[in-house]
Image (tube, rainbow, N blue to C red):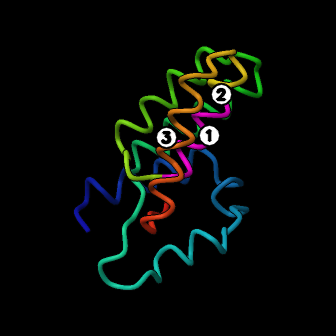
Amino acid sequence: MSSAALAVLIALLAADPAAAAGRHVDPDAIGETKRPPGARFASARAIAHYVDARRAIRAGDVAQAIADLEQAVSYDPQSAELHVTLAEALAEAGRLGDAEGEARRALELAGAGATA
């Protein structure tokens, strides 16, 4: 590890040592690392936009959630789960035709064995 990378790591840990010590290890995340060779992983950018969308939904901002989910789908178009979540947000916004299209796409992907 380079000295610059080590310095950044030390600075991050020093900034919030309690957070670093008390982090929860997600067993599902660990399972992701044990996928068989050739299995698909979700895009980190897609995940980031998905998380932003979930925050927007909790805040009641469906329009922002839709924008974030559209971005997530653009980074991981083969994710049936992202299409379902986008379909739900579109339906909540009253855009039923668009929601139906996303739900159908999710079904197509799920039938093809796609994963998130």
**Picture coordinates of residue 113 (x, y %)?**
45, 69
Residue marked by disc 1 = 85
Q: Is residue 116 magenta?
A: no
Is there a contact, CB below 8 Å, between mark 2 and mark 1? Answer: yes
Question: Image quarter for residue 1?
Answer: bottom left
**Picture coordinates of residue 36 (x, y %)?**
39, 85
> Is residue 64 found left or right of 10 in the rendered image?
right
Is there a contact, CB below 8 Å, between mark 2 and mark 3? Answer: no
Q: Residue at x 42, y 30 (%)?
A: 71
Question: Image quarter for residue 89?
Answer: top right
Q: Residue at x 42, y 57 (%)?
A: 42
Is residue 22 positioned above or below 19 on the image? Answer: below
Q: Residue at x 60, y 34 (%)?
A: 87
Which one is earlier in the sequence, the residue at label 1 or at label 3?
Answer: 3
Is residue 11 positioned above or below 5 on the image? Answer: above
Question: Looking at the image, which is closer to me, 13 or 51?
Answer: 51
Q: Magenta region's main secondary structure?
A: helix
* Amino acid identity at mark 2: Ala
Which span is picked out in magenta?
80-88
Residue marked by disc 2 = 89
Question: Looking at the image, which is closer to me, 112 or 67?
Answer: 112
**Picture coordinates of residue 48 (x, y %)?**
49, 40
Question: Looking at the image, which is closer to me, 113 or 79?
Answer: 113
Q: Mark 2 and mark 1: span between their CA atoms?
A: 6 Å
Classify mark 2: residues with Cα within 10 Å, few (<14), some (14-19) or many (20+). many
Q: Is residue 81 magenta?
A: yes
Secondary element type, mark 2: helix
